[in-house]
Amino acid sequence: MGEDNFQPGGDRFPPTRRSVIEAIGGIDAEERERALESLCAAYWKPIYKYIRLRWNRPADEAQDLTQGFFLEVLERELLAKFDATKSRLRTYLRVCVDSFVSNEDKAGRRQKRGGNIAHVALDFAAAEEELGGVVMDPAAIPSPESLEDFFEKEWLRSLFSLAVEELHQFCITGKRERAFRLFEAYDLDGNDKISYEQLAKENSIPVSDVTNALAWARREFRRIALERLRELCGSEEGFQREARSAFGRNAK
Amino acid sequence: MKYLSDKALERLRDAAELPDLSSTRYRVLERVARGGMGAVYAAEDEKLRRRVALKVLDVPGNDADLTNRLIREARVLARLEHPGIVPVHDVGTLADGRVFYTMKFVEGQRLDKFIESVTSISDSLRLFLRICDAVAFAHAQGVLHRDLKPANIMVGSFGEVLVMDWGLAKLLPGTARRPSQVADPDATVFEKPTQASDSDVGTEATVVTGHGTVMGTPGYMSPEQARGDVEHLDARSDIFSLGALLRFLLTEVQAKGRGVAGSRLDRSLEAICAKAAASAPADRYSSVTELLQDVSRYLDGLPVAARRETFLERLVRYYRRYRFFVLLIAAYLLMRVLILFFLHR
């Protein structure tokens, strides 16, 4: 078998989405807006929760700061300064958030924002509800490392949630809703006791159908998540690093 | 948008991490190991109905370096047909674009675990000789391992010793290659930097002095490998690792108090370790075979090349080697003395 047979990726998985970092720095206004929406969709929740926890801000102020931060990204072209060889995008954004909140405090600025990212539904109420499980006791303020871990985890949750949502839409369009239902029941509902046999019984299908449907759904989930991730990375090397970090629990 | 609990997040990670083997004859059973660039799974070859180990990259993508490294590793293994080196069965690309290869599934223990059950210095030396045998064979085929350490040695359930993980292997310059073998001897030790110019990629030395990343394991990596002195890497670099490995084996057994008496290693063994793991390559054994022969000499009670022994030590060694005859002669002499003594009373 020749070396060419192993060319990574081949023509099976061409990078279908342009990196948001390139697009936001581009001249096409429509593409820029779309890129900002993608960035915002993936990062608003982790950033909002991070501001609430790290900066201990009340919900309304954290909402304002979250929206203000994305405007800042656009106005001050923060992504143009991002160097993918030096850090990961989410680390860079987290540092930018810290700097932004700190500057806002110094300047004493408080204003209602959010008009330019109206296309992304920022469901702050849902984010608040999710935060319900997070310890907010100031006496137990996490160390910088645990805050970083918290941000990483929330970012991953956001990325996977978007991928699950897209998979759902993909299943509806492709008339494979049953596969999604099985995937939801087995992988998303957090029920450790559920088995393939039980799912087969509940859906009156053979166990092999459950196995195949789950294998398909997981494969598609992985593909979508990787596509989204690639879109959010500044370079192929950064993408590889991020993907290993996202999918490999023990990888460093 | 559905909220994903921590449990769901972990489950999705597990699910997403599994390789998609739908286009292959293999079926994943479980993940058994994880490394820097990929993971190893226990899988079933559905055609031959046997268990194999499947090594696959983490992520599909355009990282030619990682892909080529994995392919190179498979090809290096394919050319090393030896009982002490795990045989490769198959290599290919998954439906999701990731490169994989399959190899014999070795059921056993890593050396660092297995050594806990070794009870004598001589047993650990015999184990070491089998490792040397596999490495000597690889060197004869023009392949350096470059990451020899306890975690990369497996001891099978029937006592077979296998040298694993040839991901950092390097073909020595001047190695005769078959036409189909196009493995690049340069690219495995140093990851090419993304910003390197075309001219940087040509030789390891340039990459190293420019932006190279040294790959290997501290404590087992030779000083020249740690320095990135790639041009001068030869068999003696692996000999350094073997020296460190030998010291590990001996001190592990020694620490349990079941080896030779006393808290220090036997001087000859100490000398063998020191010579193998000398800082300067010129001070080491010139080949693994030399190291292997020296350890064998020690086991046979012969003088080792690594150290010149004193007269007293030579006597002790002779005594240990010919203990039965020495005791027999001593008994005979004692008896003669006693007879003479009683006859002259």
Image: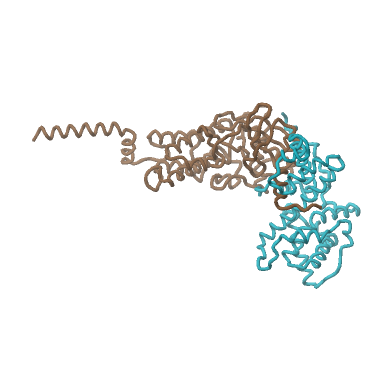
Chain colours: A cyan, B brown
Q: Nearer the viewer, residue B64 or B261?
A: B261
Indicate the quadrant where residue A113 lies.
Answer: bottom right
Q: Residue at x 77, y 60 (%)?
A: A129
Q: Position of residue A112 (x, y in %)?
A: 86, 67
Q: Tell which residue pokes out farthest to the left in this image.
A: B345
Q: Residue at x 60, y 38 (%)?
A: B165
Q: Position of residue A181 (x, y in %)?
A: 79, 43
Q: Position of residue A246 (x, y in %)?
A: 72, 49
Report whether A246 appears left or right of B252.
Answer: right
Report whether A126 appears left or right of B126.
Answer: right
As drawn, A72 above or below B112: below
Q: Nearer the viewer, residue A73 or A178?
A: A178
Q: Residue at x 12, y 35 (%)?
A: B341
Q: Nearer the viewer, residue B211 or A219?
A: A219
Is residue B193 at all visible to an observer of this figure?
no
Where's the C terminus of chain B, which quadrant?
top left
